[in-house]
Image (cartoon, rainbow, N blue to C red):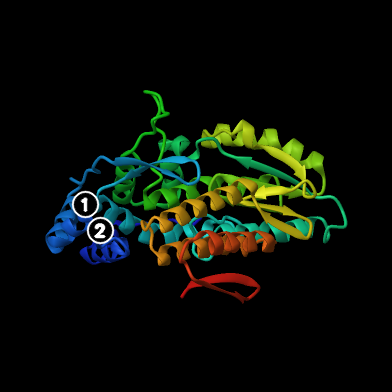
């Protein structure tokens, strides 16, 4: 294992902080808190550098809000200065930990993502089933309240195995302990906020321990994970069934996590493998029914807003194109046509031109 020392100076250097600022502000320049920080940018950056160098830096409190994605999530937003620090930390640590992640970890990584994850699982089902000529079973699991359950002490211990710079570890502890989950009791230090850039890295570092366990200890070749959602494939049902209690024991003992009891399933691929919004079956991939219904409800609402004059044509077109993008990754030609027909006939005075491109439909306002 490669050890990294003397990272702190480069991490908090004013040049690094200015670069972190540039990356952070992309797409956010018109927000009030961002404009306020930018108004005295040099003063703010150099003040932040001094606090970090003198170790007087303290992470401010978070502001919370809820989003539906599609289930309700509690997002915790850090201040601008803290998010600049998060970016500075991320740009140093991510290149260190990224090479240690397995290929089939698809969350918050360049060149990965949900569609790549689904494609990988689809490819693995063909390999295990020998192109669907023999049985293939899928063990699908989800960690319960994953971000709220990440143990601070365990996370810092994992980070500290590679990072032997005490100043960096001081800063990481400041960031990690800046938030405690509402589900933690008085004696627990658990949880990382969903809104932090560093939380994405921390989540992958944390669950990489489990990834390595599955690959090295369980010896499961066909495995994929997206954040806390993971799947194991094998032609022998008993192998997967016997792996489940071992998985639960490792998660509980080593990472202080537990599986969601209602989100554990062991089925054949002919029954359907539900992963990242898509259902995979032999020679067929469809959008999950809940996802499809949510998309159509959203388009219904957007069409109503358009007809009332609240939403402009460009925004409606973007929403429809987004839905078509999701459907284009599945065998959903019927759903694409249904969606386009709905917009065509229900959106008053919305003139659209529909054409085919690479087998998928697109919509342009004209």
With 348 as the anchor, is 34 left or right in this view? Answer: left
**Observer-nearest of 208 and 27:** 27
311 with respect to 261 (left or right): left
Front-lying residue, 318 or 300: 300
- The residue lying furthest to the right in this view is 133
Q: Is any part of residue 144 visible from this angle?
A: yes
Q: Which residue is drawn at 38% across and 59% down?
A: 311
Mark 1 Cα-neighbour bin, 10 Å: few <14, some 14–19, many ≥20: many
- Name the residue located 71 percent from the left edge and 54 percent from the top edge: 280
Image quadrant where residue 66 sits: top left
Secondary structure at badge 2 equals: helix
User: 273 or 52, which is in the foreground?
Assistant: 273
In terms of depth relative to the viewer, which is nearer, 137 or 307?
307
Residue 82's spot in the image, x, y percent? 26, 50
Above or below for 166 versus 249: below
Is there a contact, CB below 8 Å, between mark 2 and mark 1? yes
Q: In this view, does 152 lie above or below 360?
A: above
Residue that label 2 marks:
12
Q: Is residue 185 left or right of residue 271?
A: left
Q: How far from the left and from the top, in percent, is residue 180?
A: 36, 34
Q: Name the residue that disc number 1 marks.
A: 52
Q: Which mark is residue 363?
A: none
Q: How far across and down, in percent of the image, does residue 5 sit?
A: 36, 56
Numbered disc 1: secondary structure: helix
Q: Which of marks 2 and 1 is nearer the N terminus?
A: 2
Lateral position of residue 331 relative to residue 304, left or right:
right
**Separation of residues labelled 2 and 1 (CA atoms):** 7 Å
């Amino acid at each position: 294992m490669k050890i990294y020392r003397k990272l702190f100076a480069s991490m908090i250097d004013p040049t690094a902080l200015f670069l972190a600022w540039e990356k952070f502000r992309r797409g956010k320049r018109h927000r009030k808190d961002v404009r306020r920080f930018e108004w005295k940018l040099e003063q703010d950056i150099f003040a932040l550098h001094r606090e970090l160098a003198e170790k007087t830096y303290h992470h401010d409190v978070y502001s919370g809000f809820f989003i539906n994605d599609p289930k309700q999530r509690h997002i915790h937003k850090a201040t601008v200065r803290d998010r600049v620090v998060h970016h500075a930390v991320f740009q140093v640590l991510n290149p260190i930990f990224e090479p240690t992640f397995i290929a089939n970890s698809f969350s918050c990584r360049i060149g990965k993502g949900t569609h790549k994850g689904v494609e990988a699982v689809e490819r693995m089902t063909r390999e295990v089933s020998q192109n669907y000529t023999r049985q293939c079973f899928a063990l699908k699991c989800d960690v319960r309240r994953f971000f709220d359950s990440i143990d601070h002490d365990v996370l810092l211990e994992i980070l500290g195995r590679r990072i032997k710079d005490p100043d960096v570890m001081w800063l990481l502890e400041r960031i990690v302990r800046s938030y405690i989950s509402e589900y933690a009791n008085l004696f627990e230090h658990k949880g990382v906020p969903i809104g932090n850039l560093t939380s994405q890295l921390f989540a992958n570092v944390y669950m990489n321990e489990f990834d390595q366990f599955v690959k090295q200890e369980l010896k499961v070749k066909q495995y994929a994970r997206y954040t806390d959602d993971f799947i194991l494939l094998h032609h022998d049902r008993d192998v997967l069934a016997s792996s489940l209690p071992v998985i639960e024991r490792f998660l509980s003992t080593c990472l202080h996590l537990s599986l969601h009891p209602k989100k554990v399933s062991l089925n054949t691929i002919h029954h359907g493998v539900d992963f990242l919004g898509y259902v995979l079956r032999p020679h067929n991939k469809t959008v999950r029914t809940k996802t499809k219904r949510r998309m159509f409800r959203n388009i219904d609402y957007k069409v109503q807003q358009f007809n009332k004059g609240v939403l402009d044509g460009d925004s409606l077109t973007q929403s429809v194109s987004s839905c078509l993008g999701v459907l284009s990754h599945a065998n959903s030609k019927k759903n694409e046509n249904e969606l386009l027909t709905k917009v065509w006939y229900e959106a008053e005075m919305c003139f659209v031109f529909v054409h085919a491109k690479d087998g998928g439909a697109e919509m342009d306002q004209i």
